[in-house]
């Protein structure tokens, strides 16, 4: 069974962070599956870009869906088993501009000892009502970072990251599948219906 998997879009990460996330997913499927992440065009050529160049019947339909951040999963497991495992696997991540806030987050008035005094101008520039008192940054009034159901702007995303609030989620979605017996089927259409 070949499954096309799509990675949810999250803010750019360092190479080490991305590799750690993928390594954890690979570790979970280590004994019965194989993942391939590479250039979409190269993977499409390997599967076959059209009916005349495909490796097996209907494989070119999988290659047509190779778009964005995605990869191929070759597995001995059933689609139901893979789906249940992937539902369990999601990783919290920092939200970026445009993300819809899941909850209301506000900061209470008071000192912010986690930040060095030199950060105060940067926090003020982001819109936080701060001042320096005896070398400590103090929030001189309550501050609402974001409201539930509203999109997050760039400044809010930076503030959320500084305070280590992770509102986004990294997860793997199944896009389509192919098997020798059952052939090709798109899994996205059934989710949208």
Image (cartoon, rainbow, N blue to C red):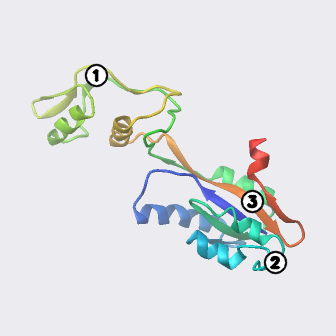
Q: Is residue 37 visible?
A: no
Q: CA distance from mark 2 to mark 1?
A: 64 Å
Q: Earlier in the sequence, mark 2 or mark 1?
A: 2
Do the residues bearing badges 2 and 3 touch, measured as CB atoms within 8 Å?
no
Q: Is residue 111 left or right of residue 55?
A: left
Q: Is residue 16 left or right of residue 9?
A: left
Dot 2: element: loop
The residue that mark 1 highlights is 109
Q: State which quadrant residue 178 falls in.
A: bottom right
Residue 56, disc? 2
Dot 3: element: strand
Q: Nearer the viewer, residue 23 or 188?
A: 188
Q: Is residue 108 left or right of residue 137?
A: right
Q: Earlier in the sequence, mark 3 or mark 1?
A: 1
Q: Nearer the viewer, residue 10 or 108?
A: 10
Residue sitting at the far right: 181
Disc 3: CA contacts within 10 A as few (<14), some (14-19) or many (>=20): many
Do the residues bearing badges 3 and 1 touch, measured as CB atoms within 8 Å?
no
Disc 2: CA contacts within 10 A as few (<14), some (14-19) or many (>=20): some
Say which of marks 2 and 3 sits in front.
2
The residue that mark 3 highlights is 176
Q: State which quadrant residue 176 falls in.
A: bottom right
Q: CA distance from mark 3 to mark 1?
A: 50 Å
């Amino acid at each position: 069974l070949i499954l096309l998997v799509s990675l949810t879009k999250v803010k750019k990460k360092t190479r080490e962070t991305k590799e750690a996330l993928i390594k954890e997913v690979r570790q979970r499927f280590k004994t019965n599956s194989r993942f391939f992440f590479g250039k979409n065009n190269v993977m499409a050529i390997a599967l076959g870009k059209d009916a005349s160049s495909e490796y097996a019947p209907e494989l070119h339909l999988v290659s047509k869906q190779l778009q964005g951040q995605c990869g191929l999963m070759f597995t001995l497991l059933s689609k139901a088993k893979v789906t249940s495992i992937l539902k369990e696997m999601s990783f919290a991540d920092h939200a970026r501009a445009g993300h819809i806030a899941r909850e209301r987050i506000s900061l209470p008035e008071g000192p912010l000892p986690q930040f060095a005094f030199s950060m105060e101008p940067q926090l003020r520039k982001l819109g936080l009502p701060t001042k320096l008192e005896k070398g400590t940054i103090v929030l001189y009034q309550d501050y609402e970072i974001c409201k539930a159901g509203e999109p997050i702007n760039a400044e809010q995303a930076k503030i959320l990251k500084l305070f280590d609030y992770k509102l986004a989620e990294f997860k793997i979605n199944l896009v389509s599948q192919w098997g020798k017996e059952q052939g090709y089927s798109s899994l996205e259409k059934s989710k949208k219906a």
